[in-house]
Image: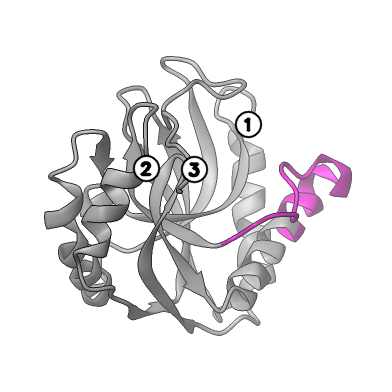
Amino acid sequence: MSEPMRDHWWWRPGWQIGRSFYTWHFTFENQPAMRRLWEHYQPVLSTINTLDPVDFEVLHLTTQGVGFTDEVTTADIDAIIDRTRHHSADIEPFTVTVGPARIEPETVKMLAQPAEPIIEVRQALRDAIADIWGTENVPETMDGFRPHISLAYSNTAGPAEPIARALAASEPATEDILISTVSLINLNRDYKSYQWRTIAAVNLGQR
């Protein structure tokens, strides 16, 4: 039996209405292969009222947090971006396989594999932050990081079986996705959805 679903939209520590967060994400607006994958699963997920499907424009792979926007200065953000360009210059673009969809207690998500090149980028982001704030002040940890893209978020507590049955009735799908850019975004979640403004996009393998 699947583990029960939980409401994804509970207020995590530090979050409140009107507060936003700087974070590094991979985004996929210009990825036809990702759009095919999203289109494959949307007809299934959109019929389940306990899920909030993710719009294609805001599909993302959460990578490394920086801090709440009211606690980070513009000067520090600019410096972190500059150091990110330095640390990512020797990391060439790479391809990962995304999918198929799977259920976890708060989401329907797709793993991105292999994880190693994504972890390498994450370490570069952490090194950039450490250059400005010191290693001891880098947010989050490397432990337990599993690169994934969420297709839908659970909006209530309840059984996972209806979602599992719906996914089982659909063919599993995967796509190979090129990763060439990592984006620093200003992220907000006031309306039970993720919305953001891109602050900077850093191309991998470029000085």
Residue at left offset 27%, top offset 70%:
34
**Span shown in magenta:** 127-146
Depth check: 187 or 3 in front? 3
What SS does tag 3 mark? loop
Residue at left offset 74%, top offset 56%:
142
- Give the residue at mark 3: 3
Q: Nearer the viewer, mark 3 or mark 1?
A: 3
Quote the CA–CA distance across marks 3 and 2: 7 Å
Residue at left offset 64%, top offset 76%:
116
Residue at left offset 63%, top offset 72%:
88
Query: Sequence order check: which comes first, mark 2 or mark 1?
Result: 1
Q: Are marks 3 and 1 in contact (CB under 8 Å)?
A: no
Query: Sequence order check: which comes first, mark 3 or mark 1?
Result: 3
- Give the residue at mark 2: 160
Q: Amino acid at mark 2?
A: Ala
Answer with left or right where residue 3 lies relative to residue 207: left
- Give the residue at mark 1: 73
Instruction: Identify the image quadrant of residue 110.
Output: bottom left
Quote the CA–CA distance across marks 2 and 1: 42 Å
Residue 92 pos. (x, y %): 56, 85
Q: Are marks 3 and 2 in contact (CB under 8 Å)?
A: yes
Residue 201 pos. (x, y %): 45, 60
